[in-house]
Amino acid sequence: MLKNVSRNRLMSSFMILSIAAFSIFMTACAGETIVKEVEVIKEVQVEVEKEVIKEVIKEVVKEVKVEVEKEVIVVATPMPVITGAGGQQYGGTLKLGIIDFGAMDPSIMGLSEGSAIYSNHAYDNLTEPWYDGGIVNRLAETWSANDDLSVYTINVRQGVTFHDGSALTSADIKWTFDRIMDETTASPLLGEIDYISEITTPDAATVIFTLKGSNTNLPQDLSDYHARIVPDGITQETLQESSTDFGSGPYTLGDHNPAERTVMNKYDSYWVEGKPFYDRIIMYYMPEEATRIEAIKSGAIDVIGSFSLAQVEGLNERDSITVTGTDSATIRNLVLDTRGERVDEDSGEVIPASIFADKNARKALQYAIDRDFVRKAVTYGFGANANDHPIGTADQMYWDEQPLSNQDIELSRSYLAAAGYNDSNPLSFELDASDFNQMLEMALAVEQSVEATDLPIEIEVTKHEESTFWEAIWMMPGGTPAVTSAWNGRPAAQAVSVALKGGGSWNESYFNNPRMDELLALSSTEIDFDKRKAYWKEIQEILIEEVPSVYLLYVPVLVAHQTHVQGVQAHPNSWTFMEDWWSSE
């Protein structure tokens, strides 16, 4: 398992992108207590080829508008350092470089990095996925189930308050999940918890989930990031449009401008004693990776979580920066549109079948790719090859004896012929990709890998903007037949059901296999472990054979942070628990 990424594991050849970086903040000096109004000028110092460039900047292009402004600054005699039980220091501001921000309402959040961090610190779940892969209690103080796992009773943690001071009770739990199960909410979690039949609250501290039958998945489904607890009676309009949050988490929402920055302030009445440590978290929106890299190098920000693995050595060689990481089931894949001919519901127009509606075309691509080449080109020695399904190798449901997909040019050629492709009629398609989360690197490596063969396959990679990729390209009507995708690690049931179950809102390949869907249902209700694992073996067999999506590689989860930021752990599911972090400065 990766922890602090050691330099001797890194590849010596890599490309470091360099642009002029910036510094946004000023620091207060120690001295006698005074209050004064001053004009603050933002300066930047950037080391480029051993020369120091110093300039006053009024604007950071495309990123953060920086202006001369007036601030009231208190310059005071230093206060004694306050420490926690483990020696953690309290106070300070944690600054993050983030790609984007999406929805405010947890129940409908998409794949935005900023939204995920915001909701995880403004709200709480009943349970949470932990660093070791297990599920731990959060707002659920305890839970139990009847013998056939069809009724779950949850005891709600007492003494928890929302940020307005009101008590969190079982009514809030019920309202949260009733909203998710209401189709008009359009929560992506609905399809995962549609096995819930009824939610009752016999008292303020007890919630009972009655299911449609036996189900083993409820504790982990309660930990989904769409299942963060909101107050009883609150509407989606209020959650989306208000200038405040409504959670019970360690931080409250302050100033929020999704084009520039989001400020979160410490909640002093947080139910976890002694936490959080930082007074403020500020997320700055920086869509360009190069800007995030230079910002952390210059010290303008403290943490970044999205960057190319090519950048690791350049970051880690600096004494002021630490790269912390862990192995994970985080996966990168090529999504193939499996839809046949269909009629557009709005226009009535007949839409031709995707070229990848033909299984033979999908199989041809599956065997055309040199997976070792792609992984090494993308991960710089990190990670592992994936095998055309999203289940992590450490998951209990992973099929250990599965045959691994490898490049087989002649087998690929036979599938191409079966699909009607040859040298005079090659399989040609556009592959949409975006330059973050290793997706563009993967697409280009796939293109190069296939070009190195003499197979009649022609791939044209099209690059798209990071900040709009999920909203404007991924799963968009009329899109190209292939697109890159990136998924955080999830337990097997979630990983397959969310991305591949027939009719699912995030079924990116539009795959529809009734037998696989039946197996998902059977596995969720099977208490006997060996029988459940047999169902999962067949699920993986189906996905490897049908290949609706070419899952190519697992990548580690990495966090780059200033060395003075302490307590950082990389989470295998890419969650962040910044209430545990503190500054040693």
Image (spheres, rainbow, N blue to C red):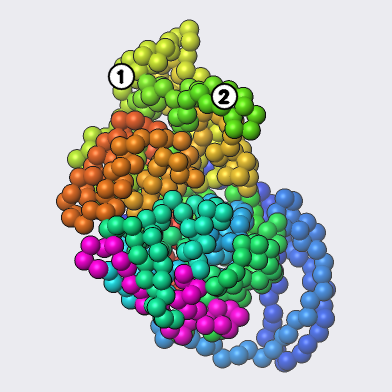
Q: Is mark 2 on a helix, strand or loop?
A: strand
User: Which quarter of the image is occupied by the C terminus?
Assistant: bottom right
Question: Is residue 109 visible in the rendered structure shown here?
Answer: no
Q: Which mark is residue 411?
A: 1
The quarter of the displayed image where residue 476 is located? top right
Alpha-carbon neighbours of circle 1 within 10 Å: few (<14), some, or many (≥20)? some
Is 165 within the magenta? yes
Give yes or no for residue 336 being in the magenta stretch. Answer: no
* Disc assigned to residue 445: none
The secondary structure making up most of the magenta span is loop
Q: Dot 2 corresponds to which residue?
A: 351
| x, y percent for residue 93 | 60, 74
In this picture, which residue range is highlighted in magenta?
A: 146-174
Distance, label 2 to label 1, CA atoms, is 31 Å
Label 2, residues with CA under 10 Å away: few <14, some 14-19, many ≥20: few
Q: How many marks?
A: 2
The amino acid at mark 1 is Leu
N-term-proximal mark, 2 vs 1: 2
Which residue is located at x 45 percent, y 76 percent? 170
- Which residue is rendered at x = 32% and y = 39% of the image? 516
Placement of 261 over or under 509, stated as above or below: below
